[in-house]
Amino acid sequence: MGENIPTRMQAVVVHGPEDYRLEEVDVPRPGPGELLMQVEAVGVCASDLKCYHGAAKFWGDDNRPAWAQTGVTPGHEFVGRIVSGDDEGLALHGVSVGDRVACEQIVPCEQCRYCLRGQYWMCGPHDMFGFRNFDGAMAQYMLVPTRARVHRVSPDLEPQHAAFAEPLSCALHAVERGTIGFDDVVVVAGCGPIGLGLIAGARAKNPRLLIALDLDDEKLELGRRTGADLTINISREDAVAKVKELTDGYGADVYLEGSGAVPAVAQGLNLLRKLGTYVEYSVFGSEVTVDWSIISDDKELDVRGAHLGPHCWPAAIKMLEDGKLPISDICTHQVPLAEFQKALDLVGDTSGASVKVSILPNA
């Protein structure tokens, strides 16, 4: 440990659903090949909130075992400065002490079928920072293990802006799953952090028409500034009817779902044209039921999932460094670590009070 690194720190520790506690714990000591990061910022994701509230995806139900673990520090959208590490670890990740880095959420095993095929984001064991087997960044310091996938980020970005690389890379991967063409009409559901990333990514693909949907006028305006050609407030206007009106009655070519709202699923199936493409990114807090005959017999849709941000991190970081997003208006709230509960509550506030909420553990 370096002489200026303390031996104790503050960290949030998961004790179970709706039981997250700020505790004083030991600063981790990096082993051979590991690095120590001083955390600058960690974004609070909708999946963090759903884990906090006990969603079955994380804590299990009759159909699946629990995946999230107690005793782990949450936080997977993070950026920080490398403050300690041996020559092996620094060389492995191509970084130096003092560099600002972000890590991909997943810590792949590199041994399962998926990892050996290069599909590391679908790693079988599926260890992840902040959820399973590796502490996340709602702490003043955290370990960067040898299996982490590390990316350097410009020190010129504000910390909360730099941490947005994780959700933006995820959104870019979902856009790639949509295989958008130049003549396509693309609809993005939701103008939250993921939805805005979907808009920015889809804009870069230059479709004929890019439409954003949301319930909040301020977020829709942010969607327009991020790249949407047209916005529709679905609390006042029938999105399905409007999209069909704009497409000679056919419907959209590609639908990117980034809201996590249950009604957005049926909405997407209904506003797509025949042979259209539906991409689902969101993590849902409950089961979603749809009429599968729309997917099969009615329209023969391509329905694709999207998970994490494989191979999209360099592009996401470059978009942030090049100022391609109105990032100051996306990153609306920053709070100290002691107010982590406030951060969770802000993310859960459905009134639209926040867009992206971040914790600054060493502020």
Image: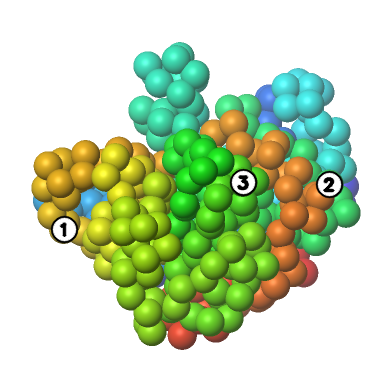
Q: To which quarter of the image does residue 112 belong?
A: top left
* Tag of residue 266: none
* Tag of residue 154: 2
Q: Looking at numbered disc 3 in the image, what kind of residue is underneath it?
A: Asn
Q: Looking at numbered disc 1 in the image, what kind of residue is underneath it?
A: Thr
Q: Name the residue rendered at 47%, 36% in the picture.
A: 179
Earlier residue among tags 1 and 2: 2
For the C terminus, the quadrant is bottom right
Determine which residue is flagged by label 3.
206
Q: Name the residue rendered at 55%, 74% in the picture.
A: 220
Earlier residue among tags 3 and 1: 3
Q: Name the residue rendered at 65%, 75% in the picture.
A: 333
The residues bearing labels 1 and 2 have C-alpha atoms spaced at a distance of 43 Å
Q: Looking at numbered disc 2 in the image, what kind of residue is underneath it?
A: Ser
> Closer to us: mark 3 or mark 1?
3
Task: Tell me if residue 218 can be seen.
Answer: yes
Left or right for 65, reference 89: left
Determine which residue is flagged by label 1.
289
Q: Secondary structure at mark 3?
A: loop
Disc tally is 3
Sort mark 1 into few (<14), some (14-19) or many (20+) by Cα contacts within 10 Å.
few
The residues bearing labels 2 and 3 have C-alpha atoms spaced at a distance of 27 Å
Q: To which quarter of the image does residue 137 belong?
A: bottom right
In this picture, is 207 found above or below 187?
A: above
Which residue occupies the foreground of this view, 78 or 205? 205
